[in-house]
Amino acid sequence: MSATVNGAVKETGPIPAVAAPVRPSAGPWRQAATRILRNRSALAAGAGLLLIALVCLLAPVYAGSIAHTDPFVSNISGTTVVGGQEVPVLQQSTEGLGLGVTPIGPTGDPAHYLLGADNQGRDVMARLLYGGRNSLLIGISSALLCCALATVLGVLAGYFGGWIDAVLSRFFDVIWAFPVYLLAICLSVVLLTSGLHLGPVHIDAGSLALPIVIIALIYVPYVARPLRGQVMALRGKEFLQAAVGLGASDARIMRREVLPNVLPTVVVFLPLMTALNMLTESALSFLSVGVQSPDASWGTIINDGLALLYTRPMITIAAGLFVALTAVALNVFGDGVRDALDPNARLRGGA
Amino acid sequence: MKRNIMIAAGAALLALSAAACSGGSSPAVSAGQADPSQASAAGFQEQHKGGTLHLQAKAGDGTLDPHINYSNGNWQVFQAMYDGLLAFKKVGGEASYDLVPDLAQAMPQVSKDGKSYTFTLRKGVKFAGGGEVTVDDVVASFQRIYKVSGPTSGTFYAGIVGADACVKKPGECTLDGGVVADKAKNTVTINLVEPDSEFPLKLALPHAAVLPKDTPAKDQGTTPIGGTGPYAAASYDPNKELRLVRNPNFTEWSRDAQPQGYPDEIVYSYGLTAEAAVTAIQNGQADWVFDPLPADRLSEIGAKYASQAHVNQLSAFWYLPLNVNLAPFDKPEARQALNWAIDRDAVVKMYGGANVAQPACSILPPGIPGHADFCDFPKPDLAKAKQLVQQSGTAGQEVSVVVSDDDVSKQIGEYVRSTLEQIGYRAKLKVISTNIHFTYIQNSKNKVQVSVSQWYADYPAASDFLHVLLSCASFRPGSDSSINISGYCDKDVDARMAEAMTLDRTDKNAANVKWGEIDRDLTKASPIIPLFTPKQVDFVSSRVGNYQFHKQFFMLVSQLWVK
């Protein structure tokens, strides 16, 4: 016999003579992992992400052993084999006045320009895989950097309050006041000319670290603000006051008491910020102010394909599809992580 | 000079020769409905008079003041609006480089020492505003070139007596003894400090247009100035449109110099991208687009709309300026290495293929006096290039390729970057806005090692390429208007160019041979690497007829039939 009280099941039957051994309850992280494993959408998205990442990591294998091409070297006067016949990679129009040159289209043959060539005669598929490495690298690195910075600043502002909070909050306000893309473009245009030189930190103009830093910086307030609020709410809790009463230092309290409580929120932010940052990177690269040649990203490939949109749309479509699939997968997985770590927070709804 | 950024470039080239416009040899491919030569020979054909011609461009080309504007786009329409003492014959083909008297009755009488040009003015030619053209208008117009600090006042017209003082104090310019009017004889005499065999060519440019003497001595911007041509601007908004209507006071005085126009109205609309403009032309909503045709539409235009496409050789070339004052290209071997490594056929493909451009072996394009047929770097030789890089001791150095953000330049820049990597450098590509690119690469303070640039002839002369682009005088360290982008300065080559210019006054053939030799030596020294000579592809609507391509000012807008 049983009755339900406040959602919990209370046993009302006779008490057993010998109590069964009590298993220690699983920790919050283990519980979260269990919840994710039960979330089919999140699992599928995670598997998709892993697959995309794996395929991109294998770019050198594809380029070197399957396509036998260097996707960073122009091959304008080169040839390839289609249907057993040698054909130029960039084909001169022969109809009418013979104007224009068109890169070879998708061949369906992984060894010979599976998705065709771009206007430099380079293998689009190989470039997509290499570009994916950079897009994912920038997305993940900038999300990590952004969340790390936001955690430090959010915890400092929320814990100390007072003038520290006032200064940091105004800093967040200033960054928040700019439209995200406008700020990113401005920073990129300035820093792409001379690189970033801040004290001992030197980043070359063409370095991938530059878009990583820029994208991370512009999104710091978007993560730091909620964290600050959460820390402020924690300040009145008994366990924090107890720690203060025990004479713990501020640094120790922040590290041992505050941080573990905001970490689940940071983890929830990570996949979502990765998706957002990857999209921002693609947008900046599309506008030529993100990843710089000779490096490639999905954004630069979309830009490359723009001039060929009319004749070879596959370049843009393929790169766009990679961006879209990865962003959707990251968002669905991010939702799963959020549901797992904080089942009560269903602010976003299902992706 | 650039096609769409010429205004900025032109304004910057105050003290140097600079290029504008283009010319070309006979049409390579031209598939219009009418034979232009026949139409021209037949005189004005009344049955085609009328209608409205709709032109398109992405953006307006700046001021409507002919003494200031320095852009291909506006120079083209100025041909139907303004006249000078002389003009390039307004016909298609080879004859378009011929000079003919325009507001002058005949070609000038030149003094024996070559320093004085005397013109007798035509009578009865009227401005759109109503007044008759007089010698006073001519004198005032020449003064105005300096008073408005015209972009070529210190170069093309610097040789006129009194020009020095005018350049220094534009507001007080009188050109005393330089441009002298004789009202009684209706003549104007222009006196030069030194003989200048190219001076008549310079008089046929829009910067030497004759305007009413009461035209304010400041940039008239969007305010139309009534000229003497068959059309006058009724309104101009560089963000919207330029509307040309017939000049009610125009009467054809010389079909060679200024023929009557066919359309009643010419509307030049701004705002559509080239892609959208091409679609509008296909749909019959526009008649022509100024901007280069999108690369991905060329095949379609050449195949499906061949009868509406016209391809003509330009007197221009695309090139790579190599900074001879910066590593690694301060070493001749490094410059020659890149010259050996570049596959010009590949670069031609990036521009649209063999029917849209020709690989260039020399600096002087075909059709320009002095052009010689030589090819010292005929085919790419990567092995030789790598060897030269090793010899130069520059292998492994970092090189930045600076290009503007248009599609073709970006592609060429990427190719050059890839080639530099292949021959042993660590190369990067730097893409900057087209709006600032031309001035940025000229300024030696920006330390540009290699860039992609292009040059369109101002007028058909070898000096307009070699002397302008590679003389010591054209190199101005630290200036945005240092058209000698390479910073190349060889006193010996300078002396030889001066000799060729002197020789040009007495023996043009000998001078041309000399220019050809200088061209070859410069190409070997490789301060610049010629890439290709472009062609102009004009795409017109199906209703347009009588297409004629002028080598200096492109398609003759006023001669198109829309009826």
Image (tube, coloured by chain):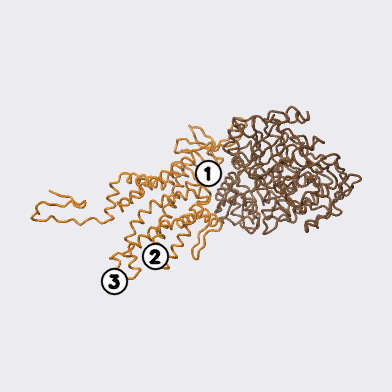
Can marks 2 and 3 be said to lie on one chain?
A: yes
Q: Quadrant of the C terminus of chain B?
A: top right
Depth check, mark 3 against mark 1: the one in front is 3
Please tell me the numbered disc located at residue A156.
2
Q: For this rendering, which residue is in front, B79 or B357?
A: B79
Q: Residue at x 29, y 68 (%)?
A: A243
B304 in relation to A217, above or below? above
Tell me where residue B382 appears, x and y as whole percent. Answer: 58, 47
For label 1, the crowd category at 10 Å Cα-Cα, with few meaning under 14, some 14 to 19 and many 20 or more, is many
Q: Residue at x 67, y 33 (%)?
A: B29
User: Which residue lies under the disc numbered 3?
Assistant: A245
Circle 3 SS class: helix
Q: Chain of mark 1?
A: A
Circle 2 SS class: helix
Tell me where residue B477 appears, x and y as whole percent. Answer: 68, 59
Q: Which mark sits nearer the N-terminus, 2 or 3?
A: 2
Tell me where residue B306 appears, x and y as whole percent. Answer: 63, 30
Indicate the chain coloured orange by its letter. Answer: A
Q: For this rendering, which residue is in front, B256 or B197?
A: B256
Q: Chain of mark 3?
A: A
A271 in relation to A312, above or below? below
Indicate the chain coloured brown by its letter. Answer: B
Q: Chain of mark 2?
A: A
**Real-space Cα separation, disc 1 to disc 2, in angstroms:** 44 Å
